[in-house]
Amino acid sequence: MSDSRPLLQLAHSPDPDDAFMWWPLLERDGRPARVDTGRFRFETVHDDIESLNQRSREGELEITAMSCANYPQVSSLYAITACGASMGDHYGPKLVARPDFSLEQLRRDGGRVAIPGTQTSAYAAARLMLGADRFEAVVVPFEQIIDRVGDGAFDAGIVIHEGQLTYRDAGLELLADLGAWWSEQEGVPLPLGINAIRRDLEAQYGPGTLEEVTETLLASVEYALSHRAESVEYALQFARGMSSELADEFVTLYVNKWTLDFGTDGRAAVEKFLLAGSVAGILPHCERLDFIAPANGRSASVSTPNGSGA
């Protein structure tokens, strides 16, 4: 018997932390979704984060990951779900280089820096730290940045995803941890990835739909965290050769208490980051900023690592 429920697409980057969170929404291996998805079905769409940023401007996807720095450009189309975010709590994307190039050189002389996208939060944070026009930024697919810096094509690079854990294996050294810099400067985590839901779902499926879907998304994250081994096993197909131990370490960094719920501090962090970017002329002013709580306003019901990076 076919399932006539409406199908919602949920887009995320092809990385173990995102895959870890959302697989419980999917029917797979002949089994139903691990969580009750209510009156909707879900399918996932995988694309790199800069492509998802670009696709969000057309409102193409009902639910999508995007860079926090991208949100001001699409705030009229999307609201932010209270769950599903990736926050750097005293850690985050890394600015790296070969041993013969220093942060002082970059500050003094500028240089060519490989970046994972012009709308990424990592790039915005680097511009806040170094100055908006202090270096020449060149977009490079994120999985190529370490190799391109290592072979001398660039003076430095901003690494995201698992590159944050593996850049030293390629002989590169840390110039700056952008998440640590931001947290030390501002006293709040660095908002990196957010999960957003298209506002017009309310008109299409009725009032309360955004909260209803957010409730289902929260149930997925809770299930994943409560069934960690099973979730990591699924996420390994997006781990680009990482061991299960390294994939689990990466998931711990970015699926934690902030992912279950921004909370007051997380919301304040988003507001502070977007305001700093706007004041610096790096990001446009954000016209609308709302966070969609789960239906009935319930809180997350599983405990997690606190994401301190310790």
Image: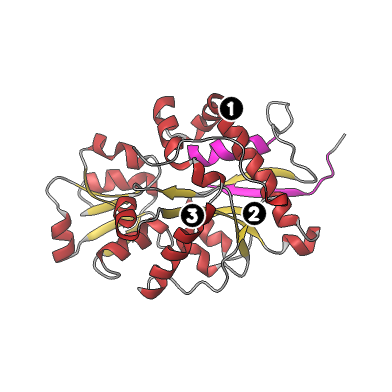
Q: Amino acid at mark 3?
A: Gly
Q: Which region shows up in magenta? A: 3-26
**Render colour scheme:** secondary structure
Counting residues from the start of the chain, the first of labels 2 and 3 encountered is 3
Q: Amino acid at mark 1?
A: His
Work out whether residue 109 or residue 144 is closer to the camera in this orientation and state it. 109
Q: Is residue 278 visible?
A: yes
Q: Is residue 243 visible?
A: no
Instruction: List x then y, in percent, for residue 64.
Output: 59, 53
Q: Residues within 10 Å of mark 2 (few under 14, many from 20)?
A: many
**Residue at x 13%, y 59% (from the top left corner):** 105
The residue indicated by pointer 2 is 293
- Residue 178, horizontal then vertical, whole percent: 31, 53
Q: Secondary structure at mark 3?
A: helix
Measured Cα–Cα span from mark 2 to mark 3: 13 Å
Q: Does 85 sit left or right of 281 as displayed?
A: right
The answer for how far apart the CA atoms under marks 3 and 1 are is: 25 Å
Q: Dot 3 corresponds to which residue? A: 266
**Mark 2 vs mark 1: which is more N-terminal?**
1
In the image, is residue 117 above or below residue 305? below
Residue depth check, mark 2 versus mark 1: number of the one nearer the observer: 2
- Against 97, residue 22 (above or below) is above
Determine which residue is flagged by label 1: 227
Q: Image point 68% across, 51% down: which residue?
A: 297
Q: Amino acid at mark 2?
A: Ala
Q: Is residue 65 left or right of residue 42?
A: left
